[in-house]
Amino acid sequence: MQDIQRAMQDLLEQKVEEGSERGLQLAVYYRGELIVDAYAGLADHASGRAVDGNTLFPVFSTTKGVAATIIHLLAERGQLNYDMKIADIWPAFGVNGKADATVGHALYHTTGIPHMPAGIGVADVSDWDKMCEEIARLTPQWPPGEHMEYHAITYGWILGEIARRVDGRPFSQILKEDICDPLGITDMYVGLPEGMDHRVAVLEEPDVVPPTAAADDLQAIPAWICPLHEWMNTPAARRACVPASNGIMSARAVARHYAALLPGGIDGVQLLPDSRMKVATASLRLKDPVPLPRGMGYALGQEGDIMGGSLRIFGHGGYGGSIAFADPELGLAVGFTKNLYSKNDAGSSIIQELKQRLARF
C-alpha cells in the first residue's frame, strides 16, 4: 500500500506542475485503513501558502452527502421517519401546497421547491431563521413526490431545519457532536468558526462566465450569489450555515465520514447499520424517468461516473470538482478536494488511476 501512497502523491504533484490543478488533497480509506493521504500545490496562490493535510477546502454540494447522513442518524434513533410529513415537524412549511411533502421527498429532491425565494439577497443567506421562513412560504412547482429536480441550495435549509426541530440542536452542532466527535474529525465544518480563515484554501476560477440573469430571477442558484467561488472566498459565506452547499473540510475528514458508513465502519465506529444504509441508498423511482440515479440524499454510481458504475456506490460531488464517496463492494471511501475550478479538472483521471492501482491487489 505504500506504493499507492507514493504513486498518488506523485500524480497530484504532476497535476499541479502541469497547471491543471492549483492545490488539492486526496484521502482514501480501503478496508478500514487510510492508505492514501496525499496533497500538493498551493492553498493561496497570492501568498504562496502551501496545501497540507489540514488545509480546509470549500466543497460546495459535497456537503449534501454529509447533511443526508445527519438525517439518517436521526431516523435511526427514531427521532423521525422518511414518510413523516415535514409540516408535522415544521408546521409553517405546510402552506401553499406543501402539506403532504415528506422527509423522504426532501432527501430525494422531489419536494418541488428547487428555486431560491425571490426578494432575498446575499446577506440573508447568513440569517438561518429568515431563510427558513422564506423557504417555508414557497409554493411547489409540482406536487411533492411527483418529479425530481435538483434542489441546489434550498435542500440545505429544508433538511437543516428538519434536523433542528426534531433534535433541538442547530445543524452545525449535530454535525460536530454526532459525526465529527465520534470519528475524531477536527476539520469538517458547515459554518466555519471565527479565527480559522487562515486554514481555508482560496478558490480560483479563471474561466468563469459572469452572471447575466437579473438578480430577482427565480433560480436554483441565483445570479446574486455568483460567481460562486468569489462568494465562498468571503468570511460571511464561510461563517454561514448552508447544509446544501457551503461545507468547508479536508479530504481526510470527508473520506473518514464515508468510511464510517461502510460495513464495519472505521476504528470501531460505524455511524449507521448496514440495514439503514440499504434504505438510504435505495434508488429513487418515479412515474417519469429520473435524470440521474439518486439515493436518499446521496448520488449513486452510474456508468461513466467518476465514482464508478455500480448503484451500490454512494456519495456526492460539488461545484468545482470536489467529491467524496463510498464503494461498499470494494470497501473503499474517497475524499477529493481542490481549489482551481477549470476545464482542465483532473479529478476523474486521479480517481481512475487510484482504482486501477487498487485492482492490482
Image: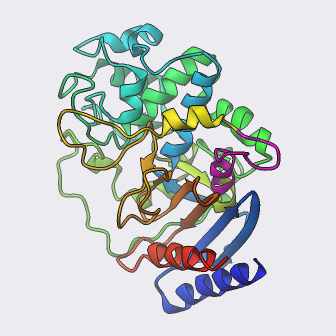
- Horizontal and vertical percent position of residue 217: 18, 41
Asked whether 160 or 240 is in front, the reply is: 160
- What residue is rendered at 52% in x and 72% in y? 351
Percent x, y of residue 232: 48, 55
x, y percent for residue 298: 46, 44
The vertical placement of 347 against 144, above or below, is below
Q: Position of residue 165 (x, y in %)?
A: 55, 16
Q: Quadrant of residue 175?
A: top right
Left or right: where 212 falls relative to 76: left
In the image, residue 348 sits, relative to residue 279, either above or below, namely below
Judging depth in this view, the residue of 116 and 291 nearest the camera is 291
What main secondary structure does the magenta stretch of the protein show? loop
Magenta range is 254-270
Give me the residue at 73% from left, 84% from top. Answer: 3
Quarter of the figure that contains the N terminus: bottom right
The figure's colour scheme reads rainbow
Measuring 56% from the left and 30% from the top, which residue is drawn there? 72
Of residues 24 and 144, the one nearer the viewer is 144
Q: Quadrant of residue 320?
A: bottom left
In this rendering, position of residue 275 left or right of residue 226: right
Can residue 263 be seen by looking at this rendering? Answer: yes
Residue at the (74%, 69%) spot, across then down: 35
Q: Could you say which is closer to the camera, residue 357 or residue 166?
A: 357
Residue 45 visible from this viewpoint: no
